[in-house]
Amino acid sequence: MSVVNEVTLKKMLKQYKYRDLTVREITYVISQYKDLKPVMDAYVFNDGSSRDLMSLTGTVPVSYRGKLAEWT
């Protein structure tokens, strides 16, 4: 998914309790870090239960000792 808009995010997050807040925050973060992409995936908890959760995947630029490095 190359371009993610608010409508797409709202559909992906339809079961989130604080969906509108989450959409605003994700929209802000991906506008600042263009390489990050939202991904829905099943997360399995220690008790064996699972939920679909969103994560951001990609590369974040980081300044280290005055040089720009990228962390994945």
Image: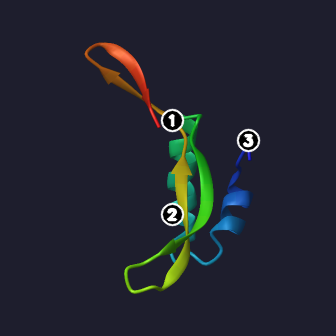
How far from the left and from the top, in percent, is residue 33? 52, 35
Q: Nearer the N terminus, badge 1 or badge 2?
A: 2
Query: Which is more toward the observer, 58 or 34?
Result: 58
For mark 3, what is the residue?
2
Q: CA distance from mark 2 to mark 3?
A: 22 Å
How far from the left and from the top, in percent, is residue 3? 73, 43
The image quadrant of residue 39 is bottom right
Q: Is residue 43 left or right of residue 40?
A: left
The image quadrant of residue 34 is top right
- At horizontal 50% and vertical 53% (from top left) the residue drawn is 25
Which SS class for mark 1? loop
- In contact (CB < 8 Å): disc 1 and disc 2: no
The three-letter amino acid code for the residue at tag 2 is Leu
For mark 2, what is the residue?
21
In this view, 54 is above or below 63: below
In this view, 66 is above or below 23: above
- At horizontal 57% and vertical 59% (from top left) the residue drawn is 23
The three-letter amino acid code for the residue at tag 1 is Thr
Q: Which mark is residue 59?
A: 1
The three-letter amino acid code for the residue at tag 3 is Ser
- At horizontal 51% and vertical 35% (from top left) the residue drawn is 59
Which SS class for mark 3? loop
In this view, 44 is above or below 64: below
Q: Nearer the N terminus, badge 3 or badge 1?
A: 3
* Label 1 Cα neighbours within 10 Å, binned few <14 / some 14-19 / many ≥20: some
